[in-house]
Image: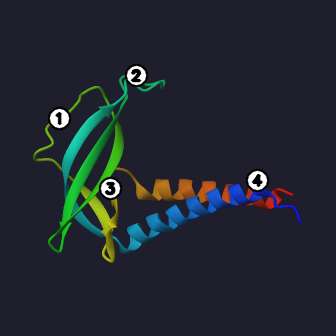
Amino acid sequence: MKINWGKIIIGSVSAIFLLYALLLISLYFFGVSTSAKITSYRQEYGERNETIRNQYTYLYGYEFEVNGKLYSGNGQRIGNSVYIKDTANRSIPIKYLPCCPQLNQALDHSPIKSLLIFIGIGVLLFYFARKIK
């Protein structure tokens, strides 16, 4: 019996995309909204190699408190060349799952858009995995 490793690998990657989409769905429907304090904010690399000039990638970290316990997360955004370093008083909206606040997401973009992208990629890879003989 021959094991088809290509089918297994593509199927596994598809399952990971679909599980992440399930996490996004659960955050969207069952997540609790709160505010998180930004703890770090930095510019990554140099200017992005895109058609629109003066676009940079910024990475940030945040912390929030649930029932007296501190949790953290991180995210990224694309912005212009103005580098804002005032992180002491800035906060961002986030969502977390009440059963496990370690699963959280910053709400700086549309979660529906991300959800559709991950579901689409997962289904497409699953389709390709089924076609492999």
Q: Is residue 89 left or right of residue 103?
A: left
Residue 78 in the image, given as x and y percentages of width and height: 36, 37
Q: Residue furthest front?
A: 1
**Do callouts 4 and 2 mark residues in contact (Cβ within 8 Å)?**
no
Mark 3: which amino acid?
Leu
| Rendered residue at 79%/61% (across/down) | 130
- Work out which quarter of the rendered image holds the C terminus and state it: bottom right
Mark 2: which amino acid?
Arg
**What distance separates the C-alpha of mark 4 from that of mark 2?**
40 Å
Numbered disc in front, either 4 or 2: 4
Residue underneath mark 1: 85
**What distance separates the C-alpha of mark 1 from that of mark 3?**
20 Å
Residue underneath mark 4: 6
Residue underneath mark 3: 107
Residue 45 in the image, given as x and y percentages of width and height: 37, 27
Numbered disc in front, either 1 or 4: 4
Residue underneath mark 2: 53
Q: Give the mark nearest the N terminus, 2 or 1.
A: 2
Numbered disc in front, either 1 or 3: 1
SS for tag 1?
loop
Q: Alpha-carbon neighbours of circle 3 within 10 Å: few (<14), some, or many (≥20)?
A: some
Q: Give the mark nearest the N terminus, 1 or 3.
A: 1
Residue 119 in the image, given as x and y percentages of width and height: 58, 60
Q: Give the mark nearest the N terminus, 1 or 4.
A: 4
Q: Give the mark nearest the N terminus, 4 or 2.
A: 4
